[in-house]
Image (cartoon, rainbow, N blue to C red):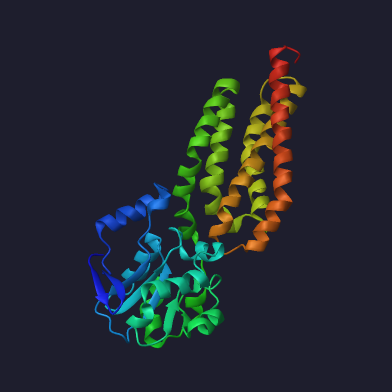
Amino acid sequence: MAENISVTESQVTTATSTITFKNRLDHFLARWGYRRAYHRVEPGLYALGKPTPDSPVFVTANYTLSFDALRSNLKGVDCYILVLDTMGINVWCAAGKGTFGTEELMNRIKATGLENVVSHRKMTLPQLGAAGVSAFSLKEWCGWQVEYGPVRAEDLPEYLKTHKATPEMRRVRFGLWDRIVLIPVELVASFFIYAVVAVLLYLLMGPMAALAATVAFLAGTALFPALLPWLPTKDFSTKGFILGFILMLPFAAYVYLGEGTPVVKGLAILSYMLTWPPVIAFMTLNFTGSTTFTSRTGVRKEIFRYIPFMAGMFVLGVLANVILEAARLMKVI
């Protein structure tokens, strides 16, 4: 992206479909959550190739990965790209939050003078932005017609041949790779809290407690998204509970087969089985907004249903730990 060129009363920024090393570095840093709010492009109107007043208009978010995915798949296409101000959020999430929405689209059309740039009143939006944009309101306001393109930008070249999307182009996938690429940002976002907790547990309760925290951290950030489709039940929270119980069983077995009175063993087992499964279940809720398995109303219902249970279970687990450590200090057991 370079100079600004004047088209009637508008400012149009030139763009290319080439993805540079700098762009790829930006993508890598975005995936790892580095300066998350800074991976964005300037909202406005961009010219790709040598567009004319009859050239098509595509709409996207100002998240660099969204913008770069669109322009890189429009190689050889002379067109305009209208970038909405979604505060650096991708199309799907921004549509859910309302920033990739009808009002922003209307305002951006007016601010860029798009109606003076092209002779038609038709634009192509990504299918995943449909939740945020009212095509009826847009047409009623200024006569602009909305055409929803395919889910994935990589299908645009084929789609543009007929402007008809196949069922496969409309299908939203959330395969293993789609889930794995979410892991780095979750690892980075939770690492500091985990590190502090693990160190404190190591100092106060020993290496096994710190190991349990490590297992919970890796389960909630990495193992869960990888195993998501294969974990039973529909709700993310119950999936997380199941995963947590399974991962804590070796710790319970270690305690059961070790030394100690039945009371000590019982309290220790309770501490593992009550403390960490709800932590893992809570962490799994981070993935509800980035999958095809959930809806906003469903997530809201799940949060209100399970958060109190998670909190109560966690408190009981901590209480079992406190009783166990207090009894040991007082040499009661």
Left or right of 141 on screen, residue 311: right
Left or right of 153 on screen, residue 131: right
Picture coordinates of residue 281, whole percent (x, y): 64, 46
Q: Quadrant of the N terminus?
A: bottom left
Reply above or below: 184 against 52.
above
Left or right of 199 on screen, residue 238: right
Reply above or below: 107 against 226.
below
Residue at coordinates 30% horizontally, 58% vertically from top-left? 23
Residue 174 visible here: no
Q: Nearer the viewer, residue 166 or 26?
A: 26
Residue at coordinates 48% horizontally, 44% vertically from top-left? 189
Picture coordinates of residue 202, whole percent (x, y): 55, 24
Reply above or below: 54 against 278.
below
Picture coordinates of residue 119, whole percent (x, y): 35, 87
Instruction: Identify the residue at the far top of this view.
Output: 331
Quarter occupied by residue 118: bottom left
- The count of marks equals 0
Picture coordinates of residue 16, whole percent (x, y): 26, 69
Residue 96 visible here: yes
Reply above or below: 210 against 130.
above
Residue at coordinates 37% horizontally, 70% vertically from top-left? 70
Left or right of 186 on screen, residue 326: right
Q: Nearer the viewer, residue 208 or 323?
A: 323
Residue at coordinates 54% horizontally, 53% vertically from top-left? 225
Q: Quadrant of the C terminus?
A: top right
Q: Nearer the viewer, residue 109 or 276?
A: 109
